[in-house]
Amino acid sequence: MTLFVVLTVLMASAGIFLLARPLLRKPATDSTAMRFAPWPTVVVIAVGIVAATTAFYSYVSNWTWQGAAEAPGHEGTSVDAMIDRLERHLQASPDDLDGWLTLGRSYVARNQYYRAADAYEHADKLANGSNVEALLGFGEALALADQTALNGKAGQLVEKAVRLAPNDPTALWWSGAAAYQRDDLALARSRWQRLLASNPPPEIAQVINVKIAEIDRQIGPAAKSSAPPAGPTPPASGASVRVRIELTPALRANGQSGALFVLARHPGERGPPLAVKRLALGPWPVEVELTGEDSMMPGRALQAGDEVQVVARISRSGTATPASGDSYGEVNYRVGQDGMVALRIDKQVP
């Protein structure tokens, strides 16, 4: 159940953060910098992520509100009625820490974020600031109610949670978001890299990879190297992938919009790729080189002698997650042995 809660929080947080991003920063002017989808597309993406989270709940969880409502003695009981009973219980037993945590989770499920913050605050006081779930729930509820709270109380709460649980995925996500919002990009990168090391689901990893890539474009290699080392430096010689990407005549005639993602991974491997680049669409064909500088995780990079699969995908929405209708192509590559290899975009994501 704990794993489920972590994964669903991360997925929902990713949708919210991507949706709020255009409000927090001005659009990039550099043609090679990260660009964001127009508002209609952003809304569709956020709704899709929330829908995926709901589906994931139905598939994984062994607890449903409906099941509780149909339990003996509770026929026809609604979610709101169960919350009412829990509130009455806590009035009679205000020292029930688990009860306050449950109430906080229930309010979040009902999108009542300020009430959730109050419940988690009670739990935090009962635990004397030592309960990670209470801290994160309190900070998350404040952030969901008002994104700017990450610059104040919410940010302080998630930082305290990170100190208590340095590898907690939810703490790493929100503390990275707080650091990003206050322009502490090196710290945001460090927190999100640590989150990637926990091997989150591919959908979450792709969102984090895009955010880290954007940070790298802003702070540059020198600033990246100033962060605390988290693994060996990728090899500099021989470990590169070079491809010349072309479109089929039909795709070229139809015209393409969005962004180009080029990545290399071990065949059949899930999770973050070995290297990835996001490029603005331009004249075709285009030549792309992936090196150790394009690695998304310290200690995990292209190595001479690797057999990798190189994928080039045109994302119509401009986001890292593949979507139906995106055009793509792929080719196998021997790192350190093959030179420039042709890669033709000739397929579509179903």
Image (cartoon, rainbow, N blue to C red):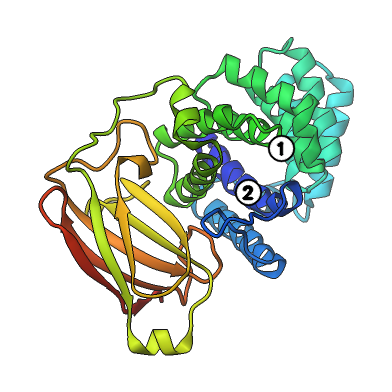
Residue found at x 88% / y 31%: 88
Q: Is residue 275 left or right of residue 82?
A: left
Q: Earlier in the sequence, mark 2 or mark 1?
A: 2
Q: How many marks?
A: 2
Q: Is residue 107 visible?
A: no
Nearer the observer, disc 2 or disc 1?
Answer: 2
The image shows residue 129, relative to residue 45, as above or below, that is above
Answer yes or no: do the residues labelled 2 and 1 have beta carbons within 8 Å? no
Residue found at x 44% / y 37%: 196
SS category of the residue bearing label 1: helix
The image shows residue 45, relative to residue 135, as above or below, that is below
Which amino acid does the dot numbered 1 rest on? Arg
Quadrant of the image containing the C terminus: bottom left
Task: Name the spot of residue 134 as percent of width and height, x first.
Answer: 70, 24
In terms of image quadrants, where is residue 22?
Answer: bottom right
Which amino acid does the dot numbered 2 rest on? Ala
The image shows residue 268, relative to residue 212, as above or below, that is below
Q: Is residue 116 left or right of residue 166?
A: right
Q: Which residue is mark 2?
A: 12
Kindly report the distance in space between the C-alpha atoms of the residues bearing marks 2 and 1.
14 Å
Task: Name the spot of residue 1 as percent of width and height, x first.
Answer: 53, 37
Task: Name the spot of residue 213 as percent of width and height, x first.
Answer: 48, 45
